[in-house]
Amino acid sequence: MKAIYIMWLREVKRFIRSKSRIVGALGQPILFLVALGYGLGPVFQKAGQGNYLEFIAPGIIGMSIIFTAIFNGMQIIWDRQFGFLKETMVAPVSRTSIMFGRTLGGATVAAMQGVLVLLIAIVAGFRPVSVFGLLPAVVAMLLVAFLFSALGIAVASKLKDMQGFQLIMNFLVMPLFFLSGALFPLGDVPAALLWIARFDPLSYGVDALRAFLIGTATFPLALDAAVLVGVSAVFLWLGARFFSEIEV
Amino acid sequence: MTNIIEVQNLTKKFGSAEGEFTAVKDVSFSVGEGEIFAFLGPNGAGKSTTIKMLTTLLHQTSGTILINGSDPRKDSDAVRRSFGIVFQDPSLDDDLTALENLQLHGMLYGVPPATLAARIEELLALVELSGRRNDFIRDFSGGMKRRLEIARGLLHHPKIIFLDEPTLGLDPQTRNHLWSYVQKLNADEGITVFFTTHYMEEADRVAKRIAIIDHGTLIAQGTGGELKAQTGTATLEDAFLKLTGSEIREEAGSSADHLRLRGQLWHGGRR
């Protein structure tokens, strides 16, 4: 328990202290909100779909969460290169609890980033449908953050250096984001794209966020929750397994 | 004197598609409780692989290891509690302060919170870093990091401390200080010290007993005096060179690098 707590605390402390990382990670969501939200807004409206800013705000929150969570998981590669990983590998605690603590820490950090983006979206003109949706939305953010934090750790445990990072960004993170329905409604897309989106866990995360924040959804909320919890469990198991196989 | 480290017929083979490579071959030695023991050898001789096996980071192919009476393979947590380690490369978290690094270690090792703060202060004083407790590690010099790592390695009252080239890259002043802390700890707390170094003069001065490994095999062990007498040399450096030869060794960073290197040689040879 103590090991889980201290590893969680480490992630949170490091995040809160790295002001440049927080601000840097906010740049992209702001750009997406402004460029797409305001830029494509009129087109979206003319197509009879309503307010685009309202529509993509939950998607952009999902984007900042998946980026932060996976990036945080990838920190294992830095820890391996800078040696800190060894310190935790010879400690008399199970590697599973170290991995779990790191996952929780990464999830907390990514959810915090998600809340920050929500606040920025509100400043930019986004209006959540009801205040009562805010708390469940934060819970959904935590779930999404946990899922991708575990995925990031699972992937990073298999990588020896940062050379694979670009590969992960371009062939894992970007597709997960762009195919999730974060930027477009899944209701009217070609069947093939909808099928792909169905295999993307972020689709369910963004869908749940939309349900709580703007009151519309593609999938039933129970399905969103089931997929997020189920896939999280699989990634957590996979991450714990890969992490325990790391040789330093 | 009882033996706190007992190693018998230790062998480690690394297998790959290209073939097998024996990093450590039938090595046996023991270290008595409270002893200062130097483990020497040229680069790639099997030092790091042996330390990894002693410290639960790697499993042996065959042979037995007992650390403080426990088998690293079966009871890794008991073994891990019984030693502290300073790795060859720094293993501190740069983005945390000195105090936070020590607190993190204390919590991972289950040091009771009631005694943790006092123990931290005691060790910070020992390594003369009390005034820097709230500074970030990224602002520390190499010598300060080493001192802090020694303090951290001792936090949970281990019976053994492993120091893997603890003085590498440090100036003579810092090296001197570092060994005086280590000798003080050995005298005051009776802690067993197991260290590696490339500075023969340090090994001769500090270690009570020395073992030399080369090409994965233990080729000599005894006191500094014994090794010099055995080889008929005046200094330990000469004794070491006489035992291991004076040709330059291929630098191999880790066992994985070693494997890669051998793989390349193999492929290169076939083409």
Image (tube, helix red, strand yellow):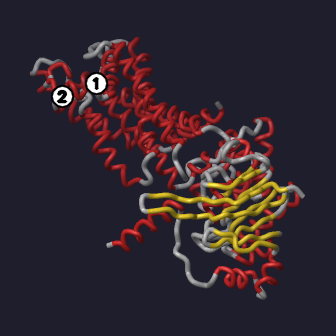
Q: Measured from the top left, where is residue A14 in percent x and y?
A: 53, 42
Which of the marked residues, 2 or 1, is nearer the chain's N terminus?
Answer: 1
Q: Measured from the top left, where is residue B30 in percent x and y?
A: 78, 61
Please identify the quarter of the rendering in which residue A225 is found.
Answer: top left
Task: Identify the residue at the far right of this view.
Answer: B1
Q: Amino acid at mark 2?
A: Leu
Q: Amino acid at mark 1?
A: Gly
Residue B120 higher or lower than B248, as above or below:
above
- Mark drawn on residue A193: 2
Nearest to viewer (mark 2 / mark 1): 2
Q: Is residue B103 visible?
A: no
Q: Measured from the top left, where is residue B269 in percent x and y?
A: 38, 74
Q: Secondary structure at mark 2?
A: helix
User: Which quadrant does the N terminus of chain B fall into?
Assistant: bottom right
Label 1: chain letter: A
Mark 1 highlights which residue? A125
Front residue of B134 and B245: B245
Q: Secondary structure at mark 1?
A: loop
Which residue is depicted at the point 74% across and 74% down? B220
